[in-house]
Image (tube, rainbow, N blue to C red):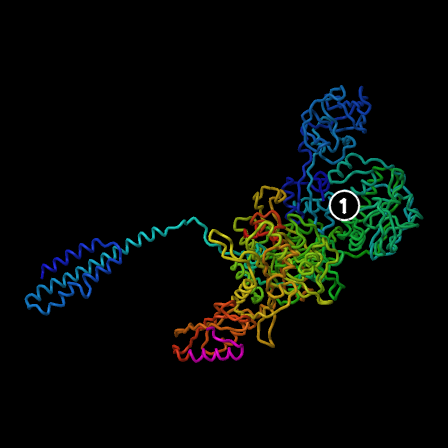
Amino acid sequence: MLDKLEEIKKEALEKLADINVSKGLYYWRVHYLGKSSTLTGILRSLATLSIEDRKTIGAAANRLKVLLESQVAAKENALREAHLKTATQEASIDISLPGRPCPVGHLHPVTQAIEEITDIFASMGFQVAEGPDVEWDYYNFEALNIPAEHPARDSMSSFWIDAPPGEKGKKLLRTHGTAVSARVAERMEPPIRTVTPARVYRYEATDATHLNIYYNMDGLAVDRGITMADLKGTLYEFVRRYFGPRRKVRFRADYFPFVEPGGEIAIDCIVCRGAGCSLCGNSGWIEILGCGMTHPDVLRRGGIDPAEYTSFAFGMGLERLPMLRYGIDDMRLFYGSDLRFLRQF
Amino acid sequence: MKVPLNWLKDYVDVTLPPAELAQRLTMAGFEVSEIITTGEGWANVFVGRITAVNPHPNADRLRLATVDLGGEQETVVCGAPNLTAGDKIAFARVGARLINPHNGRVEELKEAKIRGVASRGMVCSEKELGISESHEGILVLAPEAAVGAPLSEHLGDTVLDVDVTANRPDCLSVVGIAHEVAALTGQAMHIPEIEYAETGDAIEKSIDIAIEDPDLCPRYCASLITGIKIADSPPWLQERLIAAGQRPINNIVDITNYVMLEYGQPLHSFDYQQVLGRKIIVRRAAQGERFYTLDEVERTLTGEMLTIADGKGTVAIAGVMGGLNSEVTGATTAILLEAASFKATSIHYTSHTLGLTSEASMRFERGISTEMTLPALRHATRLIAALGGGQVAKGIVDVYPGKKKPVPVRLAPAACKRVLGIGFSRDKIVRTLTALGFACRDEAKNLSVTAPYWRSDIKQDVDLIEEVARINGYDKIPATLLADTIPPQDPSPEITLKRRVRRALAGYGFQEIVSYTLTGLELLSQLDPDAQPPQSPMLRVVKPMTADQEYLRPNLRAGLLAALAANRRHEDGGIRLFEIGKIYVPQGDALPAEPELLAGILSGARTESSWLGDGGGSYDFYDVKGSVAGMLASLGISARYEKSDDPGLHPARQAAIVVGEDGASLKLGVLGELHPRVAANFEIEDSVCIFEIDITALAPLAVAHRMYRAVPRFPATIRDLALVVDSAVTHQQVVDIIAGFPLVSQVRLFDVYSGQQVAAGQKSLAYRLVYQSPSHTLTDEEVNKVQEKILKRLGTELGATLRG
């Protein structure tokens, strides 16, 4: 009987070695370890043997069973590994082929600029205030110390609306975002800190650096104890955040009817860094915004007592900022809706 | 304003190099846009004196000029008509680099033989030297020019081109800028006394001046000079005018221009013989009056324009331009010289209504001080007497109905700190203001400050504070951040909403565009299938610049379609665009409503074609509906889609976007495929789907923070339901019924079929129903019971049967 077991062992291991597909393992298992296998027969017949034989043969048969089972498991594992190896090799792909297209949309660069700038000011406590595009003469001009026939109106040629005048003068397309600040001063109570993105309109010819419809970004702060130093600090911080810490900033006196004292902020030229070039008109500086301490008469018209409160205001051409930052040389590109331009942002 | 430094030096010592001076002026509010240096390129050009002029042996129109250069002489060929022996001129030696007047290029002067005569050098014109455009004759220099000296020593100058802000008309002058320079650099002003002899009769005998409209003319001053001779101005005067950018004309006109540039007060010279009736009347024009101005253009005046008239009629448009009828000519022998003040707004009105601006109107409309008239008039009178000969009548006529006492402004020294954030000592304030010509007087704790007579812009204390700040420099102001009382922050829900919408749409592959808010009828008409202009009222601008910017846009659709059509010229494949912007709706006398809209467009191929295949098909109704539903879902809004009748959209493939239940329902907008004829109007061949949503109406509906709902704890049971219904039955009708049953947590349509497998006039709809209970695992019996009820109700209400 022991010889028989030895025979089974030899034959089974030889057959197992020859198997190279997993299906073969199934048949091998049925044949050598299945219910009707010789080994199973021997194990079943143990009861009919003498106690002595039962001990030796039983032990040998069980050893053989354990051996065969472990060998077939090892073989099975080896076959699986081999199969996986070939399968993954066969499944190799050209990773340089393009991926499935996924549609990508972008926000307009002006939207991005508005959001970024309003976020910078929001972090300093300014919230967005808005106003109408079609405005009364009063808010656009009169309330801002620009009465009829004032020369400042010449630099802001207007699109007037074909409609009879109303309680607050004629209707026009606002020429500057400061019109909204005039409304804010009237409708809000101090403390006020607002920033206003506003589409503005000028009756002027357009070219690469001038449009007749474009955006302003205006700001207004009203409170007790606000000074020109606060104005300077706020705007320097804004410039630092938008253009980075390496830009030089110049703050000089300038005139706008609705502020006194008035000022202008310029940065050193992005192209020549102050040496002088065509972008900066050889001055080395690029003006980016006008500002000043809100004129007491303007505050008074807004119902704010200038003896109690001080205020600063600022305004800038919005497109100029992304133009400088991205080196865009033609302002008309913003509103031409050309996807080849817009997709770049 | 062009300020030649040599001229400026008459009034103030210039102690800084030009670039530094320009920088100081710029910082103080007078931006120097350009520093022009004349004489830089004048190497090899010298002052010479013409000693002899002889005919050219071979040419009638050329002559030979012998020029003394101080020790040596050159004889050169010259064609200029004004060659005069004895004149000092600019002589260019061989090697000089001059402008060729024929092509404007700088060229090196070479020895030449002109019609057989050798010529080594040249007598220069202004144009050749780059001083002006004048090339009719040679430049004649002032007699004091030193023969043999480099020309740049005599004529070279640095000119600052200063941008003067609208509040400072006094600085449209050399003296005005000199005051600034004096204050900025700590130098004293040199103001010469103006003295001249009045040898004629009393002026009152010769002229009678009346102001009929003192509201428009607060002051009118005049002097009279008789026996003058019209001639060219002396070279020094011409040189200065040229340096300041003015063209010399004759001694009288040049003097009025010179004094205007020097003092800032415009002057006008009348030919006294042509002032009829020895009378000047300042009055409004007759409505519709016609009048020839100096530039020989006939102007039609309105009754609101101020004129200067004589005994017969108008002789000048006050403050804007003189008349042809009283112009100073070569025959003029007596000058009535006017220095007046006119109301700024009146001059602005006249100048802009006539479309006629002049150096004078530009100054008057900025509101120059009435006190400027007399010094300027006296200065000019002296110059005319000195340079034109003649006798000055005794006295000056000064009609001054608008005289006002100067009002001092009270300034508390502490107010500087309150406004500027940096304090200046009382002493510093006084010194700064005094340097600018202000008079400061102590008034208890405060200062009482009187502005100098030439300043018309000082009204209140902040005006003085600005003076202190700008003269001491804005760079002295510290930079501080606002104190920390931050006002309450209430971000508008609309702004937050717009950010969310933009991001959702960009995430779906939509590109944002921003288009112009002014549009034209041609574009708007394309939106109508029959190409008719819009019927609803729109806002029109009074004087459109172009036909395509005549109306404020009544929709966003036109701009999007135009953008699509434009991009189609260089782009195939799918295009998805959106815009968020205002539209404008007239509201009678009030300002228009400006609701904010969101509109989008999908056109062309649904997926980008690639090596993987193009995924199939063009955008259709269900794409735009899916995009809108997805975007709304991201805001926590679920909408219904109802039949609609937008004429610009495909009649059978459009829907209104509606929220809220019956009774309180609100139409948010519309979506659908574009009407094929509208697409044809825009010459778009691909499929086009659009949507429009009222963002203003959407804002209050958007859910900022949704409440959490528990994740189901018990397993779901899934059942499919294939129904056959009449073709007219909609999916919505079926879903409304199914979703109303308890335990049904989801209903999803997964197939729609009509064709051979179902009877004609019918269709099959297949749904997957998810049953779920929050409290327990459902049994088959429970689910079966509900499903049976659903079927029964679908059968009775919609005639639905189970598909066999």
* B788 falls in the magenta region: yes
Figure check: B4 above or below B88: below
Q: Position of residue B420 (x, y in %)?
A: 61, 56
Figure check: B319 above or below B619: above
Q: Chain of mark 1?
A: B
Q: Position of residue B416 (x, y in %)?
A: 63, 57
Q: Tell me if mark 1 has few (under 14), some (14-19) or many (20+) residues whose alpha carbon lies within 10 angstroms of its own.
A: many
In terms of depth relative to the viewer, which is nearer, B792 or A249? B792
Figure check: B85 above or below B189: above
Q: Is residue A57 toward the left or the right of residue B140 in the image? A: left
Q: Secondary structure at mark 1?
A: helix
* A234 falls in the magenta region: no
Q: Which span of residues is magenta-colored?
A: B783-804
Residue B410 seen: no
Q: Is residue A43 toward the left or the right of residue B71 in the image? A: left
In terms of depth relative to the viewer, which is nearer, B477 or B346? B346
State whether the magenta stretch is mostly helix, strand or loop: helix
Quadrant where the N terminus of chain A sits is bottom left
State which quadrant residue A129 falls in. Answer: bottom right
Q: Which residue is mark 1?
A: B263
Q: How many marks?
A: 1
Q: Position of residue B331 (x, y in %)?
A: 89, 38
Residue B63 seen: yes
Q: Position of residue A54 (x, y in %)?
A: 8, 66
* Amino acid of disc 1: Tyr
